[in-house]
Amino acid sequence: MKTSTKVTVGLSLTAIAGIATTVIVSDLVINKVLQLSNRRKVKNFVKVKFKGNDTLLDLIDHLDDKEIAAIIRAGKKLNDSREKVAHYGENIKDATLSTKDKVLEMLDAYL
């Protein structure tokens, strides 16, 4: 093999290794930032809804990242459920009004 070919292969392998390292490190950084963001969201929730309860804030400090992520997921599910209930409530209200109108029409026609 020529020297230039060996140098080209060596540089290519070095470039590939550098790119792989960059991808791995950037993925780790993104995950760490996401974990810190989730922890901050939970702390802000405690500060607003529980008036900064020191016991809860201390508890949050001792939870690991998986437990914080579970709290975030539970909060999202609760929010989705609340939206569904509100939607069903609107449907029930509309159906009740419609039934009331029909009953009143029947009474008017009968009387």
Image (spheres, rainbow, N blue to C red):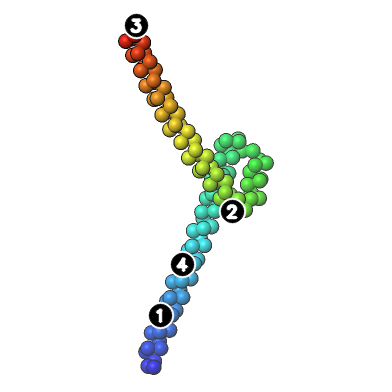
Judge by depth and name the residue closer to the eye, 91 or 64. 91
Residue flagged by tag 2: what amino acid is it?
Lys
Q: Residues within 10 Å of mark 1 (few under 14, many from 20)?
A: few
Q: Which residue is mark 1?
A: 12
Please name the amino acid that badge 4 sits on: Val
Mark carried by residue 23 = 4
- Say if mark 2 contacts mark 4, CB within 8 Å: no
Local packing at callout 3 (Cα closer than 10 Å; few below 14, some 14-19, many 20+) is few
Residue occupied by mark 3: 111
For marks 2 and 4, give the one nearer the viewer: 2
Q: Earlier in the sequence, mark 2 or mark 4?
A: 4
Q: Nearer the viewer, mark 3 or mark 4?
A: 3
In the rendered view, tell whether residue 103 sits above or below residue 15. Answer: above
Q: Indicate whether 12 appears above or below 97.
A: below
Q: CA distance from mark 1 to mark 4?
A: 17 Å
In this rendering, the label closer to the viewer, 2 or 3: 3
Residue 84: x percent and y percent? 46, 36
Mark 2 → mark 1, Cα distance in angstroms? 39 Å
Q: Mark 3 or 4 closer to N-term?
A: 4
**Percent position of residue 53, x then y:** 64, 38
Q: Nearer the viewer, mark 1 or mark 3?
A: 3
Instruction: Mark 4: give few (<14), some (14-19) or many (20+) Cα within 10 Å.
Output: few
Say which of 67 and 54 sits in front. 67
Q: Amino acid at mark 3?
A: Leu
Which element type, helix, strand or loop, lies under badge 3?
loop
